[in-house]
Amino acid sequence: MSRPRKQIHLAAHFPGVNNTTVWSDPRAGSHIDFGSFVHLAQTAERAKFDFFFLAEGLRLREQHGRIYDLDVVGRPDTFTVLAALAAVTEHLGLAGTISSTFNEPVEVARQFASLDHLSEGRAAWNVVTSWDAFTGENFRRGGYLAQVDRYERARTFLETAHELFESWAGDEVVADRASGEFLGRADVGTFAHRDRHFDIEGRFSVPRSPQGRPVIFQAGDSEEGRAFAASSADAIFSRHATREAGQAFYRDVKGRLASYGRGPEDLLILPAATFVLGDTAPEAEEIAHEVRHRQVSGPTAIKLLEQVWNRDLSSYDPDGPLPEVDPDPREHTVAQGRASVRMHRDPLATAREWRARAEAGGLSIRRLMVEVSARQAFVGTPQQVADEIDELVQTDASDGFILVPHLTPTGLDEFADRVVPLLQERGSFRTEYTGTTLRENLGLPALRTAAS
Amino acid sequence: MTQQLHLAVALDGAGWHPAAWREDDARPTELLRAPYWADLVREAEAGLLDLVTIEDSLAIQTESYSGYDDRTDRVRGRLDAVLIAARVAPLTRYVGLVPTVVATHTEPFHVSKAIATLDHVSGGRAGVRVQASGRAHENRLVGRRELPGTDDLLDEVADHVEVQRRLWDSWEDGAEIRDVATGRFIDRERLHYADFEGRWFSVRGPSITPRPPQGQPLVVVLAHEVRPVRIAARAADVVLVTPHSGEDARSEVERVREVEAAVGRAEPLLVLGELLVVLGDTEAEAADRLARLDERAGGPLSSDAEVFVGTATSLADLLQARAEAGLAGFRLRPATLPGDLRRITRDLVPELQRRSAFRTSYDGGGLRERLGLARPDNRYAPTGARR
């Protein structure tokens, strides 16, 4: 008997506040009106996606000390939007990024347990750590943490949150009218946690939620991030949407699970991916080309270059050659509130590589930035895109994808209408939701509950 | 002309009587489920009420001031009130949604954007009732060791609200310009740093969330004595007071007005009186209900608010009489849910309508407008330009 076909997991990422999102398109809608969130979430649910995902950034980005104004600016509160979306969807998972740096474990645990109750078991938490004093200026407990401390604090934050989620077994509320017993025991929710970062105790106020705890996501490519995911996460977001890089990442992370007493089915690997569809392959390429140019306008190209160069390059012509001057390798001061500046850990090497590429192709600053920032993972006809996604999943380059539309809020419509049915025909994607919780729909093993 | 009353209902668990969960129509196993809250808020909306508040606290419920009470015969466990409000917002259109938020320990930046988002999601119906939390067992939940005095706690609440408000204004209306020609999504001249520095926190801003539809969502403070009244006068739009007689109501309102003058407040606070209500078709039935509830609870109901026991008609009499003391309306705490809420929406409201003392339909508009409060100018916008 042949092994059942591996099932693809798909998620819809609400378009973010970077230049992937093309707000200049006449069809582009609001990033704040609730209607936009409803549209994307209901499209994702109509297409039987696993979950909706909302990112978070706790300080508006700045460049040269001024608020960055070329990309979408402004977003809602994650928890509030997800709770509201629970009212207009029935099966779709509701995932949000919440920082472990600028929150207390008790608050975050309360909010996620509440979201899980209010959505009947559809909550997911992308645990991130914040990296900078810049963001910390918005918070009473804000401030800089060294990279190693960040993961240490994130780990212990998550551990503490788990202790809170587990502090109710799930059978305490008896609500027996006749006897007058509401609780079966008095000391419900009791917890105490003491370590270098947290010294807290008391009784947690939210009874056990339908999933026991939210599904835990982790994003992060560093050694510490991979180890954190392998030890504690249910899914990891990655940037590796190509086959070789995807397979290498997949092997690496899944290979780490055994040392934490976990199996390969305990952690899903879900790269983020953009897509462009066309009726023919050349048409898709043409649309993709146009989208890339909209994503990287002349002014945006200069700003992106500054994020690597760490210098003011405003006097440069985006249609001209790269600057003669090298990047300033000192501490990055130009762009703040942006994780991507950390991707270029050796800006001088990046500059050398880009210069070579620009010279070889005769590329202007803008054309180079279009090339190096190109993000579309899937470009083609619906059939091509469906084939490619399925192939990547079946060959263990990923367990599915988090799709990032470049248009708000209608950017997923065509994918839902034209690609999903093809994946369903192949038997690689569900035609109906089968689980009652997000955890079940993701095919994750049941939690060992405190009550059982 | 007969005074038009504003009516709010305070939602909490199975109701405000400790034995409420044992009533036949109670849904004690559903208190953590969305349909329960959706039904309650829809009922309030069917009754054309101004707003609902939703109680909350950082710690689990307790009747002991000094810590956990170990009781097993009362409702224990609750959900985050802001998230309940968000969950019911798409299911309702008119009724105001005012969750309780603890304004000590918590981050004003998070709370500000959460309430702003609730306002966006609800189309301008959001408010926030801020409360202090400073008991020892609550502090230990977040690892705070020092026990601040009441004045410090209240100051922290006032600062918290100040930061929330600055952040709501940190985006001028219309700051999102989407100017394709210049490639600018926003006009950053219309975004502002909050730059708050206080004893408990400093917050730079701007908010990550654009200015909410109401400009400033409604801020509500419950005040039992003069110190919280001062905080309300500095920071709130609505103050809830707990008079136990008409005379009391008059002096509470006078005190509010004096404090307003003392702190130099221009717009008067909207003053709502609090009442815990046990209703019945007859006076005797209401009294019987309370007796039954008290017996099940193992003792008489005690409350910071006056307890009203009687018919909807006699409650309407009391509300109208007490309103003459200068109250703009009332926040009613139903003894049981949904029982006393239904008696409010189905008996009291029609009675007040017959007396021309309550609206007969919702007009459009947001929560502030319904309460007769203007949409505030943005503190950061250039004078004259109401953005």
Image (cartoon, rainbow, N blue to C red):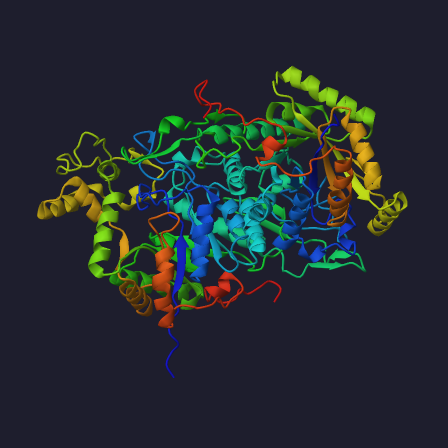
List x then y, in percent, for residue A61. Answer: 36, 36
Residue at the (47%, 40%) spot, across then down? A102
Report whether B99 appears left or right of B164.
right
Q: In which quarter of the image is residue A268?
A: bottom left
Depth order, front residue of A316/A151: A316
In the image, taking residue B185 as reference, residue B203 lies left or right, namely right
- The percent position of residue A410, horizontal first and vertical second, equals 38, 51
Q: Is residue B284 toward the left or the right of residue B165 in the image?
A: right
Q: Residue furthest right?
A: B284
| A6 over B55 or under it: above or below | below
Residue B351 in the image: state x and y as whole percent: 78, 39
- Asked if residue B103 shows in the view, the reply is no
At horizontal 50% and vertical 44% (from top left) the residue drawn is A197
Q: Where is residue A83 in the image (x, y as percent from the top left)?
A: 53, 49
Compared to residue A198, the image places residue B206 above or below, namely above
Q: Does A190 appear above or below B310? A: below
Query: Is residue B57 shown left or right of residue A8?
Result: right
Please state, as top left, top right, bottom left or bottom right, where the N terminus of chain B lies in the image: top right
Q: Quadrant of residue A4?
A: bottom left
User: Who's the residue at 49% across and 61% down the image?
Assistant: A438
Give above or below for B234 relative to B109. above
Q: Is residue A265 visible?
A: yes
B265 or B136: nearer the viewer:
B265
